[in-house]
Image (cartoon, grey):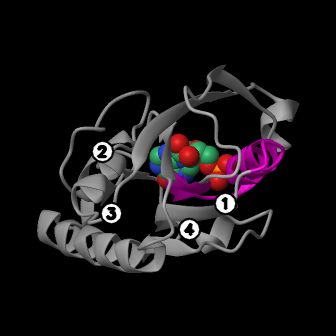
Amino acid sequence: MEILLTREQIKARVKELGEKISADYSGKGDLVLVAVLRGSVYFAVDLSRCLEIPFVLDFIGISSYAGAASSRGIVRITKDLESSIVQRHVLLLEDIVDTGLTLNYLMQNLRTRNPASLRVCAFLDMPARRIVNIPLDYCGFSLPDFYVVGYGLDHQERYRNLEVVAALKEMP
Ligand code: IMP
């Protein structure tokens, strides 16, 4: 494994994002943070601790279909939001935007529920693998094309609890 982002780098950047988001949403009222299960949980917890504005934290669970459907970005909602987002400001928290297919599906789904606004905050952006181009309103770090783990990101459910982000390399 090669460490790409240290604990200190992540902490500093998450704090910056929290300050920016707090300033942008200050006085707007009724912000719902939607964290996508399971990868973005670690990011959502740390980011939400840095916010200086009121918010509701909610979760949406998704799972990809195998095969052709996954390459078209068709995902299944395994756990829906508890809160209504009608006429509320929504900030979707993603762990990583890779092809963009999952984010595209989620944005389309949430938009049909008539939020007052819908923005995205992604912890990691991997633009090299993008298929659907969706502008990211807030982004922690942009990384080159590696398979990364840690800070919520897994490889077959392992490594989510690493406090760093590391590139997973094949054994020689
Ligand atoms: P998408 O390709 O943008 O649709 O990415 C969908 C999901 O795949 C992300 O939310 C992650 O959960 C997972 N994923 C994509 N790239 C990586 C990676 O490099 N490491 C771990 N998980 C990833």
* Secondary structure at numbered mark 3: loop
The residue that mark 3 highlights is 53
| Range of residues picked out in magenta | 89-114
The residue type indicated by label 3 comes to: Ile
The residue type indicated by label 2 comes to: Tyr
- Magenta span contains residue 120: no
Q: Are marks 3 and 1 in contact (CB under 8 Å)?
A: no
Q: Are marks 4 and 1 in contact (CB under 8 Å)?
A: no
The residue that mark 2 highlights is 42
Q: Is mark 4 within 8 Å of ligand 1?
A: yes
The answer, for residue 39, to whether it is visible in the render is no
In which quadrant is the N terminus drawn? bottom left
* Secondary structure at numbered mark 4: loop
Q: Residue at x 12, y 70 (%)?
A: 8
Q: Residue at x 30, y 54 (%)?
A: 48
Is 83 in front, or is 76? 83
Spot occupied by residue 128 in the image (x, y as percentages of width and height): 64, 72
How far apart in space, not on screen, are marks 3 and 2 (Cα)? 19 Å
Please identify the residue farthest to the left as the structure is shown: 8
How far apart in space, not on screen, are marks 3 and 1 (Cα)? 17 Å
The residue that mark 4 highlights is 126
The answer to whether 74 is drawn above or below residue 10 in the figure is above
The answer to whether 116 is drawn above or below residue 26 in the figure is above
Left or right: 2, with 62 as reference point: left
